[in-house]
Image (tube, helix red, strand yellow):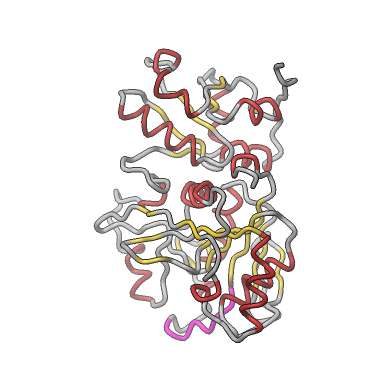
Amino acid sequence: MQPISQVSSVGGAVLVGGASRRMGTNKALVEIDGVTMAQRCVDALTEAGVSPVINVGGPPGVDWGLGANHVPDLWPGAGPLGGIITAMKHLVEELLVVVPCDLIAPSPSAISGLIDALGSSDLAVPVVGGREQWHTSVWRRQSLDHLISEFRSGVRSIHRAAQGLDVAKPTVPVGTGSVGPFDDADTPAELDRWRRRPDDEEPISSAQPIGDLMSVPQISVAELEAALADGAPLYDVREAHEYQAAHVEGGVLIPLGEVTQSLDRFHDDRRIYMICASGARSGRAAEFLRANGFDAVNVAGGTNAWIKSGRPVKSEAPVD
């Protein structure tokens, strides 16, 4: 099976259906810091390099204003499993990232980490505080026939439908008092966890990709472009064939597997920028480098996000 690092086609879906009874209004359109919850999810997927992104379900005639195509749920009212199947039938990408519209603090780096955690499995589901978060997931398209068969047999639970599939279950860090990258909100009170946070408290998701144990600053591709214009050093930790196919001009190739033995190759007197395909591998590299005294930051969404933004890349002929 193709390694995840070589997968270039990753689509995304935000599930905007659901009754939202406990919230008292349509959760997808509830605003946090002036942006709807659904829009925040679309933006996080896009920043992670996921494209195209669609929103699935929800009432007809709503002006979603998401910058993502709206796809009616083929089985409205049947729960999120129907929405996942609808998305997989609509999109043709090899991988599908699914998130619910009510994530409080959706994070590009956490999404990238979940994609990377898929490995060769059929499905990746994050584990938060010992609990599997089935509504947020990454699926291989090859799982579609299995899901349709389960759905036709009457199964409506994602957990039950996934039985028989190879499921990766990466652990997501949980911080006291912070909002994690896959925490959702079913009630107004749960939203207050975000709205009443101290001014100096950031959500875990903006600083900790999956599996990271220390804070790693994240920047956008726009911020990277500005830093490169000022001569900032950029290091690409993908494999050689990925780098040769397309890389940000000026990036120095040091594959992730070589980072621990290559500390002398990194600038130690200025801020350095780390990039990979989606932001997961470079997040781990930045974490290691920061633990060793380097001022390393991670590029959220990685090279995929750089390309999706329309910024130019360089390519090189393979070395025999």
Q: Is residue 130 above or below residue 212?
A: below
Q: Is residue 162 above or below residue 275?
A: below
Residue 188, horizontal then vertical, whole percent: 38, 76
Residue that appears at 38% across and 44% down: 207
- Please give the count of numbered marks on the rendered protein: 0
Q: Is residue 37 above or below residue 109?
A: below
Q: Nearer the viewer, residue 210 or 38?
A: 210
**Is 21 in the magenta?**
yes
Looking at the image, the residue that sits furthest to the top is: 264
Residue that appears at 71% across and 25% down: 314
Residue 5, horizontal then vertical, whole percent: 59, 40
- Specify the principal SS of the magenta part: loop
Horizontal placement of 97 versus 136: left or right? right
Looking at the image, the residue that sits furthest to the left is: 176
Horizontal placement of 294 versus 56: left or right? left
Span highlighted in magenta in the image:
16-22
Horizontal placement of 297 versus 254: left or right? left
Residue that appears at 52% across and 47% down: 112
Looking at the image, the residue that sits furthest to the front is: 164
Residue 124, horizontal then vertical, whole percent: 51, 58
* Quadrant location, the C terminus: top right
Determine which quarter of the picture holds residue 250.
top right
Residue that appears at 69% across and 49% down: 9
**Is 109 in the magenta?**
no
Residue 116, horizontal then vertical, whole percent: 52, 46
